[in-house]
Amino acid sequence: MLTRRTLTRSLTTVALAFLALPFASGGCTKKSDEIPVGAFLSLSGSDSTFGTDTRDGIELAVDETNAAGGIKGKKVKVLYEDDKSTTQEASQKVRQLIDRDKVVAILGEVASSRSLAGGLIANTSHVPMVTPSSTAVEVTQGREWVFRTCFTDDKQGQVAARFVRNELKKSRVGVFYAAQDTYSSGLAKSFRDEFRKLGGEVVVDKGYQKGETNFTTYLNELKGASPEVVFVPNYYNEMVQIARQAKQVGLAGSMFVGGDGWDSANLIEGAGAELEGAYFTNHYAPDVPWPNSKKFLAAFKTRYKREPSSLSAQGYDATKLLFDAMTRASEVAPDAIRKALVETKDFQGATGTMSMDKDRNANKPIVVVKIKDKKFTYASQVMAE
Ligand code: PHE
């Protein structure tokens, strides 16, 4: 029988064993055997699926690399920081990862506004940062330490405009975007410029304030101008509200065209039916016809029992590309890693083949996705100029 005395004694023994553990097993040295890489993501807040989906892709890449022996004989450890979908936290978290955790490189963010904020810190601290999905042109501009493994919005807007004008054969469009958001307003601009160049007309152009939830007045104005298509380059959470309210004012969901910010299972859950037949430009879809995508798709499905979003595929690719550079680098230190990143050429990813151009952007094919039967289905791919 266990008496109180023996119980106390055994608890004390267990507690002492725990206390002694780090010293006895060399807990401190063990930590430095791992290479610390930071990741700052929106794991909570308004754009949380961007962060959690990206993390799933990163984790898969880390486990594959570590299982295959790690980098230069060491295991990699990714330290995650949640910026709660705010730019202020994004800066603080990057600062912490660099000053406190001494990371050798950083992955993140998804939203361009937060990559701009975090990238400023990484750039001035001389720690390389790789964003998997931030497409606004400014993110890497003039920042020697900031890289991206995706296309940029000048190209994305151009492809969307060409698709609407040449494939859908429409000539009258509306543009509806989040006015103060770097990504949304930048993508709206490049779409508008290209659409006009192609001889099309922008018959209504409206910017809403980020955080607004009632879009009825705007939607009625859009309807009044009778556009054939409305381009809405925003994030999924706002698009769900817009699509639902559009239905109420009598605008067909199939007339909307979006950008990569629509990519979330929440868009389908919240407004899949309302957006039946709509199109958006993206980095990836589970049924893209590229050989490397199939291998990734199978591995992701085995592990997570669902299909990956574009964010997961991008997170996976950014991580693998960074690890490839770390393996090629003369040493696992920020400066050497930066040099190896610059030299990246024809890296085969799940989202296409990537080479870093002189502005540290990856020139990649842009996928057009159709919302069909509440699923994202691959429609076509375009290589931007
Ligand atoms: N491209 C968006 C941005 O720069 C982020 C995003 C990428 C969102 C891919 C969804 C899918 O802000």
Image (cartoon, rainbow, N blue to C red):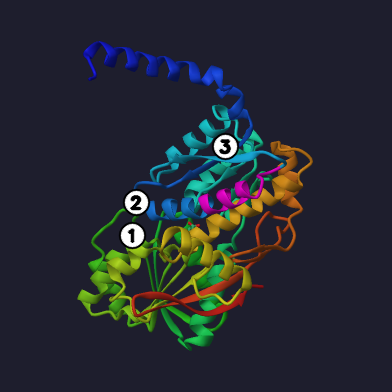
> Residue furthest toward the left?
248
The percent position of residue 6, horizontal first and vertical second, equals: 28, 13
Query: Magenta segment, which residues?
Result: 59-71
Mark 3 vs mark 2: in front: 2
Mark 1 secondary-structure assignment:
helix
Across and down, in percent, residue 138 comes to 58, 53
For the residues marked 3 and 2, what is the alpha-carbon distance in whole angstroms?
A: 23 Å
Looking at the image, the residue that sits furthest to the front is: 1
* 335 sits left or right of 147 in the view: right
Disc 3 marks a residue whose amino acid type is Ile
Q: Earlier in the sequence, mark 1 or mark 3?
A: 3
Q: Residue at x 38, y 43 (%)?
A: 84
Q: CA distance from mark 1 to mark 3?
A: 28 Å
Within 10 Å of disc 3 (Cα), the crowding (few <14, some 14-19, many 20+) is many
Picture coordinates of residue 280 (x, y %)?
45, 73
Residue 61 belongs to the span the image colors magenta: yes
By secondary structure, the bulk of the magenta-drawn segment is best described as helix
Q: Which residue matches tag 1?
A: 237
The answer to the question of whether label 2 and label 1 lie on touching residues, with beta carbons closer than 8 A, is yes
Q: In which quadrant is the C terminus drawn?
A: bottom right
- For the residue marked with disc 1, what is the amino acid? Asn
Q: What type is the residue that disc 2 sits on? A: Ser
Circle 2: element type: loop
| Disc on res. 46 | 2
